[in-house]
């Protein structure tokens, strides 16, 4: 079937289906699932269904009631996704709210993201704030704390959490740090992190941390400004 373009520049609605380009720069609503090559949202869009696309760019406001499957999604505005997100690259420079799980090769969060389920990636890098309701699982995890980050559990090979670019006034007005129930990995470096348990091969607890239990296999270092309840070699 030949793919055609779907362009809404004012206010309008359309049915789902197979498309080449889906572009909404006004206020648009699409009824049904969408399968397209490229999707570009500059206005306000509602997709009542799931979206499958090679590339998705959102600089306006979008809502998808179903799942999103794409190779690359770039969010510079805001988006609410009612299902799971599957992609190769997830770039959030704005605001993203995912009701399901996020699965990506690379996940970059420079704005704010709320993921109600699990987040699974090869590489996870964050410079903004995020909330993950389940497990954050990635080979390489780099978190630069500019705001509050919360996750139930973290598992990875290399885990690095550092606080950067936070002024004294921001520390007084906002809580900046990472909160997790458990963190488990091979090499772990943490700053300004609160956790019940940290388990790893080589573990470094930096300033501003409050950890109840640390279990390590080969190396353990603790900053004088950190609080650690108990630690033991296993």
Image: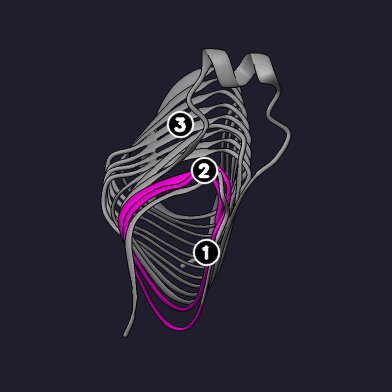
Residue that badge 3 annotates: 62
Rendering quarter of residue 145: top right
Foreground mark, 2 or 1?
Answer: 2
Picture layout, residue 77 above or below residue 155 = above
Residue range of the region highlighted in magenta in the rendering: 190-219
Q: In which quarter of the image is the N terminus?
A: bottom left
Q: Would you say residue 193 sits in the magenta stretch?
A: yes
Pointer 2 local density, CA inside 10 Å: few below 14, some 14–19, many at least 20: some
> Residue at position x 54%, y 32% from top?
147
Residue that badge 1 annotates: 2
Picture layout, residue 144 above or below residue 14 = below
**Residue 41 numbered mark, or none:** none
Left or right: residue 189 versus residue 32 is right
Q: Please provide percent x and percent y for residue 74.
A: 61, 47
> Residue at position x 71%, y 23% from top?
167
> Residue at position x 46%, y 31% from top?
62
Q: First in sequence, mark 3 or 1: give its number.
A: 1
Q: Please provide percent x and percent y for residue 112.
A: 51, 35
Residue that badge 2 annotates: 192
Pointer 1 local density, CA inside 10 Å: few below 14, some 14–19, many at least 20: few
Pointer 3 local density, CA inside 10 Å: few below 14, some 14–19, many at least 20: many
């Amino acid at each position: 079937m030949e793919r055609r373009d779907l362009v809404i520049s004012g206010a309008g609605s359309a049915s789902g289906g197979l498309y080449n380009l889906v572009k909404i720069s006004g206020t648009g609503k699409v009824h049904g699932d969408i399968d397209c090559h490229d999707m570009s949202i500059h206005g306000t869009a509602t997709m009542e269904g799931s979206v499958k696309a090679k590339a998705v760019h959102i600089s306006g406001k979008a809502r998808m009631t179903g799942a999103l499957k794409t190779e690359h999604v770039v969010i510079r505005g805001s988006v609410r996704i009612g299902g799971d997100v599957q992609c190769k690259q997830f770039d959030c420079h704005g605001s993203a709210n995912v009701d399901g799980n996020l699965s990506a090769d690379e996940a970059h969060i420079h704005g704010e993201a709320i993921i109600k389920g699990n987040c699974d990636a090869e590489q996870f890098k964050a410079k903004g704030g995020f909330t993950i309701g389940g497990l954050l699982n990635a080979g390489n995890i780099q978190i630069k704390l500019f705001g509050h980050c919360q996750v139930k559990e973290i598992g990875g090979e290399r885990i690095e959490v550092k606080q950067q670019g936070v002024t004294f006034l921001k520390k007084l007005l906002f809580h900046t740090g990472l909160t997790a129930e458990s963190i488990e990995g091979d090499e772990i470096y943490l700053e300004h992190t609160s956790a019940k348990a940290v388990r790893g091969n080589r573990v470094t607890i930096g300033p501003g941390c409050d950890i109840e239990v640390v279990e390590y296999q080969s190396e353990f270092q603790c900053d004088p400004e950190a609080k650690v309840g108990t630690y033991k070699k296993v």
